[in-house]
Image (spheres, grey):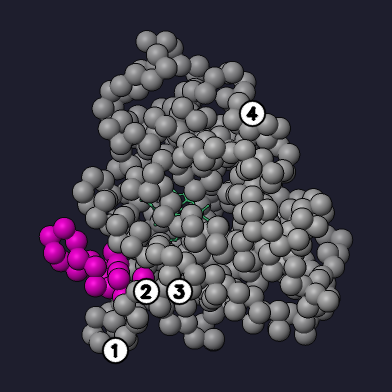
Amino acid sequence: PVAIPRENVLDNTLTLLREGYHYIPGRRRHFKSDIFQTRLLGQKVICIGGKEAAEVFYDEDKFTRIGAIPNRMKESLFGKNGVHVLEGNAHSHRKTMFMSLMTSERLSELTALTEKQWEVAIADWQQKRRVILFPEAEKIMCRIACEWAGVPLWANELSQRTRDLSAMIDAFGAIGPRHWQGRIARNRSERWIRRIIAQVRSGELKPREETALYTFAWHRDLQDRLLDLQTAAVELLNIVRPIVAVGRFVTFGALAINDFPETKEKLRVGDDDYIRMFVQEVRRYYPFGPFLGAKVRSNFKWTGHQFKKGTLVLLDIYGTNHDPDLWDKPDEFRPERFDEWEGSPFDFIPQGGGYDMGHRCPGEWITIDIMKVSLAFLANRIDYNVPKQNLDYSMVRMPSIPKSRFIMRDVAISS
Ligand code: HEM
């Protein structure tokens, strides 16, 4: 086998934390190779990136997710025993439960809900001189998520629930206090959702049958048993939490409208095709998920390199979305590039790659629909000023967000 380019270091965890989203793509450039070896968290790790890399990473005969997610991420972001770490028939069965929610009726309902919640928000924003978009967008997303999933949400708990769902997301690349806030938030959120599922099972609460709450409360596993309360709560949070995460893409979308004013003109024409391309470009261009991990299931060779059973492999998500072999001038924001994009499941992977019944994100349609409505709203429905502020976003902090969280002044309905 051909030797894999390697970093001769004892451990590179701190370098990874110092370089963030640029860590893997930077090394790929340095080694002029889509594969290199390093050491992270005390173990040998192989990093791969690009379209062929994504294709092999999603080959389930070669990779397993078991043992690939560090405990600290389960404690904050994902929860334990959820769909992310299932395999084989158990995974297919659970994944089918998620996919059953993504019907065209339920997606239309989501679009209508999203429109309604922005209208509610604007009524309030008009009374204020200053609005900070990111936390407001997260609250809007929290309302949408709970209503769509059938989860009751009282007005007086909106702020705390949103903060908790946000903190779980914010914890994923963190060590120290941000990680601990994520853990506290997860514990509190799991308690909340366990109680709600218990109320459904006792008949106290009667959600509509097509909602995630109903579906997950009554889902039966392959042994025909209900999910235990804890697992059902983890999975319901796997719907509600990532919808709140869409607030990050919405904030980056507002930044794009601000930084590339020609896009605002085009969005204002109201052409559905342009909105779709704009949303895709926001998901490609801005940093969110940096990479994904999986373990080698059994020995195999790829591009002449040996992969040994049990080795942790990271797939470069950010770098694949910015790969100069795949994207013309990848560091330019240009929605029109999606006019020519051929729709490969392996080159545009902000929410993972491969096919629905693998581990690819089941929430991609939801994400796109919510973003379309939200960004069309920001571009067309309202006028606002963007005062001087620090809109830089870090390429080191994971997850990233503009420093000022996007402050808007004098928001008014568009004339
Ligand atoms: C999986 C990103 C929105 C539910 C994933 C994965 C990524 C991702 C990178 C991992 C894919 C893999 O392991 O191969 C995102 C981003 C989102 C988003 C950036 C937008 C902010 C959503 C939404 C939902 C959702 C709205 C709600 C339905 C899930 C679930 C999985 C997943 C349940 C696990 C799938 C599995 O392991 O089979 N997402 N996602 N995500 N996502 Fe999303």
**Cα distance between the residues tagged 3 and 4:** 39 Å
Q: Which residues are magenta?
A: 211-232
Tell me if label 2 and label 3 are in contact, CB under 8 Å.
Answer: yes
**Cα distance between the residues tagged 2 and 3:** 7 Å
Q: Point out which mark residue 324 bears.
A: 4
- As shown in the figure, which amino acid type bears the numbered disc 3? Trp
* Furthest-right residue in this view: 388
Determine the residue positioned at 35% across, 81% down: 208
Question: Does the magenta run of residues contain 165?
Answer: no
Label 4 neighbourhood size at 10 Å, few (<14), some (14-19), many (20+)?
Answer: few
- As shown in the figure, which amino acid type bears the numbered disc 1? Glu
Quadrant containing the N terminus is top left
Respond yes or no on whether mark 2 lies under 8 Å from ligand 1.
no
Determine the residue positioned at 15% across, 66% down: 225
Determine the residue positioned at 42% across, 73% down: 149
Residue 61 x %, y %: 27, 32
Which numbered disc, 2 or 3, marks the residue that appears first in the sequence? 3
Give the labeled residue for mark 2: 211
Q: Is residue 209 left or right of residue 105?
A: left
Image: 154 above or below 103: below
Which numbered disc, 4 or 1, marks the residue that appears first in the sequence? 1
Which numbered disc, 1 or 2, marks the residue that appears first in the sequence? 1
**Cα distance between the residues tagged 1 and 3:** 19 Å
Image: 98 above or below 412: above
**Cα distance between the residues tagged 2 and 4:** 42 Å
Q: Point out which mark residue 244 bears.
A: none
